[in-house]
Amino acid sequence: MRDGASSVRTAVSNLLLALDRPLASFHLVVGLTFVLTVMGVIMVLSASSVEDYTANGTAYGLFVSQLTYAALGVVAFLVALHLRVTLLRRVSLAAIVVSVGLLIAVLVPGIGHAVGGGQRWIGLGPITVQPSEVVKVALILWGAHLLADRAVGAPMKQLVLPLVPVAVLVAGLIALEPNLSTAIIIAILVGTMLYYAGLSVRIFVALIMAALGAAVILAFTEGYRSARVRSFVGGWTGTARDTLGADYQPTQAKYSLADGGFFGVGLGGSKAKWSYLPNAHNDFIFAIIGEELGYVGAALTIGMFALLTWVGLRIARRQADPYLRLVAATITTLIATQAIINMGYVVGLLPVTGIQLPLLSAGGNSIILVLFLFGLLASAARHEPEAIAALSTGRDSRFGRWMRLPKPRPYVAPYRATPDPRRAPDARRATDPRRPDPRLGARPGGYPAPSGRPRPGGSYGGYVGPSPYDRAPYGDPSLNRPRPGGQARGPQARSAQVRAAQPRGTQSRGPETAAQPWRRGGVGDAPRRHPDRRRNP
């Protein structure tokens, strides 16, 4: 027993050390993305083979289509890894304008294609585009771009406008397709983004209640929606259920999960896919996973999504760039929400909706855009301060060297100078940081330049948000140029001057040591000790 306990402690210690490596988050995102993508292609082949053979005479039609879309998604994943943050912010407005235009075009007769009672696709030759999936990516990029420039504790008007009106327009256009489930996802996406940006909890709860009220009203405006809601309520209250009508799919999904047992019936041995469970390869793919791989396979699937959620939120927490922080947190919440809703209605905990299981359900637009989002998440993992420090020393992974991924640049937040009262023309301007002294000059992007000499314990002011995205979001190169008198300026120079003014023995370590915390231990202290992130350099 002692040897066993020692082995467990050693394994846990090694696991924690592995998770503390600079590129651990990046490797986890890439690994989980690869496993889920391969698993999704295999399960789509297993779930669709019977009906595909019955309809087309071949069992590999949908499998080949899914494999092709997965290959395109891998390309999108790699493209997202190579995109610079500046480019993402510059194209965010154009992306939201184009996606809203596509949402309007899909409602025009003759342009939008109606399949299964919903007009949700636009045909572009051999390719069909689903604007409701494209707009998710556009909203994440554009919303994070807007909210990243807002200061902490900004008024509600600055947080809500213009993001919420555009989100309401997008959700309304999607609901007209009709596609209520995706409209609810849009509302959840924007609400979580506002929450991460610092929206008041009371206002956040009020928005949630308003969205739930609108969802309930819309749910009873269509016959099939109200039938699903009544079916869900009847399952919990024990009232009569229509097992051959509205309750048919949920009932067959539960039978499929029950037949799987603990270890499953084996890959390819599902009975539900023999036309018992409609849409088994798409919305109810989790039921096939539970039947063929058992509770073990279902638990592993849930565990992979849970691990991906934890890694994504850890990436967001470690970010120095507020834009990447919002992007990573919103992507993680979006993927986790879709997975929870899909698995929830398969097992009977939620009403049935059309939300797919990310990377596992069949769908061309879905898998391409989800892999693109995972690529953005992996790129954000490479922009963690510890990862940047490790990559700057040439410690890139084999995957990064093979793909020739660009080296991420450290984020340098702008500083707002506190004008010197002795030089200010009036007392109001001296105390109001929003009205800097024009005689002090201005930095590129409209931020006032620091003035005066640094004093021990003094401050030039705190953060005011990220640097202008179209100027130099990772630090203006001119800030570190020497002054005519030979004195450098900028965050690095001010940090060095403050350290020189401190008593001997209390100076903080240099940028290289502070940016590489694994050399001294204490990985969790890296975001707090990095010189470029101090509030009082």
Image (cartoon, rainbow, N blue to C red):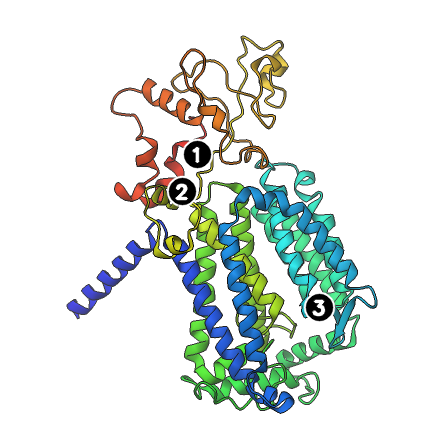
Q: Which mark is residue 383?
A: none
Question: As drawn, is 402 to the left or to the right of 464?
Answer: left
Point out residue 521 in the picture as x, y percentages from the top left corner. 27, 43
- The residue carrying mark 2 is 385
Question: As drawn, is 147 to the left or to the right of 475?
Answer: right
- The residue carrying mark 3 is 125
In the image, farthest residue toward the front = 125
What type is the residue that disc 1 sits on?
Arg
Mark 3: secondary structure: loop
Can residue 361 be seen at all in this image of the molecule? no
What type is the residue that disc 2 sits on?
Pro
Sequence-first tag of 1 and 2: 2
Sequence-first tag of 3 and 1: 3
- The residue carrying mark 1 is 533
Position above or below: 463 against 224: above
Question: As drawn, is 401 to the left or to the right of 91?
Answer: left
Q: 148 or 29: nearer the eye?
A: 29
Figure quadrant of the N terminus: bottom left
